[in-house]
Amino acid sequence: MNNILRRAFLPSLMAASLAGVTLVPAKPAAADDQVLRDAGIGAVTNVVTGAVRGRHNVLKNAVRGGVTGAAVNGANGLRSTHHRRHRNAAQDVGVGAGTSALTGVITGDSKDTLGNAVDGAAVGGAIHLLTNHK
């Protein structure tokens, strides 16, 4: 009886799971582009501000900036469609500063928390200037 059930249900279960895996990720592709765009803006901005401030660890700066950019995008993604198009500068700068300071502590750069917050504020401001659709 067990073999009969396996032969009857296993092929249909595999087909259903394969269809679900291939069809589900097709919808949120536009949102992923925005997150990647903001993470890229954040990474580049944080590398530049890190170089200006004398923090030459490019990889840590890029990671911290990418995380900050994604967080700024996420904070705006929680808002309504109208507010996503017309971003709030104070929110972008604040989320950027807080996220960069927290990410700096997590990555082991807790000696310069204020500097990390300043870098994050610059990331939030850059994202706001480059992506605000007014």
Image: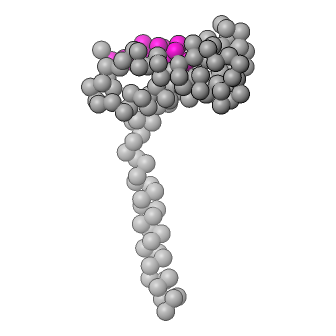
* Nearest to the observer: residue 17 or residue 73: 73
Residue appearing at x 47%, y 69% in the figure? 14
Percent x, y for residue 1?
49, 92
Residue appearing at x 49%, y 29% in the figure? 71
Does residue 119 appear in the picture of this structure? no
Verify whether residue 84 appears in magenta: no
Percent x, y for residue 16?
42, 66
Percent x, y for residue 2?
51, 88
* Nearest to the observer: residue 55 or residue 15: 55
| Image quadrant assignment for residue 115 | top right
Percent x, y for residue 113?
64, 18
Colouring: one colour
Verify whether residue 130 appears in magenta: yes
Question: Which residues fall within the magenta stretch?
Answer: 119-133
Residue appearing at x 41%, y 19% in the figure? 91
Q: Residue reaching furthest left?
A: 82
When the figure is inspected, residue 108 is found, relative to residue 89, above or below; the finding is: below
* Nearest to the observer: residue 43 or residue 105: 105
| The C terminus - image quarter | top left
| Image quadrant assignment for residue 46 | top right
| Image quadrant assignment for residue 31 | top left
**Badge count:** 0
When the figure is inspected, residue 70 is found, relative to residue 13, above or below; the finding is: above
Q: Residue reaching furthest bottom?
A: 1
Does residue 107 appear in the picture of this structure? yes
Question: Magenta: predominant secondary structure element?
Answer: helix
Residue appearing at x 36%, y 33% in the figure? 78
